[in-house]
Image (cartoon, rainbow, N blue to C red):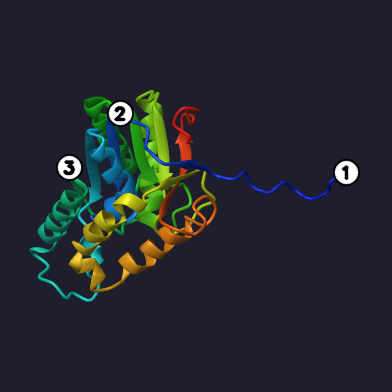
Amino acid sequence: MVNALPDPPPEPVLWRSVPHGRVLVFAPHPDDEVAGPGGVLALHRATGDPVRVVIATDGIAGDPEHRFDAAGYPARRRTESTRGLRELGVDDVAFWGFPDNCVLAASDVERGVLAAVAELQRWRPDVVYLPWQREGHPDHHALHGIVVRALERASFGGLALGYEVWNAMVPDVIVDVTPVIQQKRRAMLAHASQLAYVQYDHALLGLSAYRSLVHLRGRGYGEAFCVVRGTIAADTAR
């Protein structure tokens, strides 16, 4: 009998460790670098992998009720990111300082692509993390497209993985981040300006707990990723 029903999506691979090498992370705003792949970055640093984080925007739109001094707000966001990344063992971070929450013209996109290509050529990463394709926030969605174009233009031959923040994905990979989940929590707590609006540490730790459902019997925490470029090596998937 022919099965007329579509096949379910394949079960994600479980990684209990991360692929080793030089790591480059692209984040839309100051805090996405810890909110999304924060646990994985802690795992990379624990094994000695060099990690560089690039934060695209100044995050100025992250204070819609004007609770903080506007003149010092971008610096506040940068300080929070630096402190949060320190909790993960990361001390290499670059801030492009682009404005956030804007409609991008073609020239803006090209400027971002050129900046991303420069980072790729300078850092020569083996692994790249970027927002996944269907992130709901416009800045996340835009950065995905910008980095994908940059990966193509730079002929990137490594592994690029998309991470989730605002929209949950059907993942290709779940990384067990249980051993470093408290580091991720402390890193998110460093972003006091954002927690004043949204208790995203609670929400994203809940998402990480949910990601333990398939492989970890609901005990522990995982981070989800989808493959943007490259393939999952058999010796990494374990």
Instruction: Check disc 2 and report its element: helix, strand or loop.
Output: loop
> Dot 2: few (<14), some (14–19), or many (≥20) neighbours within 10 Å?
some
Instruction: Assess whether mark 2 and mark 3 are in contact (beta carbons under 8 angstroms).
Output: no
Front-most of residues 137 and 47: 47
Q: Is residue 126 above or below residue 68?
A: above
The earlier-in-sequence mark between 2 and 1 is 1
| Amino acid type indicated by mark 1 | Val
Front-most of residues 223 and 110: 223
Q: According to the image, label 2 marks what residue?
A: 21
Instruction: Check disc 3 and report its element: helix, strand or loop.
Output: strand
Q: Is residue 2 left or right of residue 79?
A: right
| Amino acid type indicated by mark 3 | Ala
Q: Position of residue 115 (x, y in %)?
A: 25, 36
Residue 102 is marked as none
Q: According to the image, label 3 marks what residue?
A: 94
Instruction: Check disc 1 and report its element: helix, strand or loop.
Output: loop
Instruction: Assess whether mark 3 and mark 1 are in contact (beta carbons under 8 angstroms).
Output: no
Q: Is residue 89 left or right of residue 149?
A: left
Q: According to the image, label 1 marks what residue?
A: 2
For residue 26, what is the image quadrant?
top left
Q: Is residue 114 left or right of residue 134?
A: left
The earlier-in-sequence mark between 1 and 3 is 1
Q: Is residue 235 above or below residue 61?
A: above
How much space separates mark 1 and mark 3, taking CA atoms? 55 Å
> Dot 1: few (<14), some (14–19), or many (≥20) neighbours within 10 Å?
few
For residue 135, what is the image quadrant?
bottom left
How much space separates mark 2 and mark 1, taking CA atoms? 46 Å
Name the residue rendered at 45%, 58% in the picture: 219
Q: Position of residue 154 (x, y in %)?
A: 34, 25
The earlier-in-sequence mark between 3 and 2 is 2
Q: Is residue 41 left or right of residue 83?
A: right
Name the residue rendered at 47%, 36% in the picture: 238
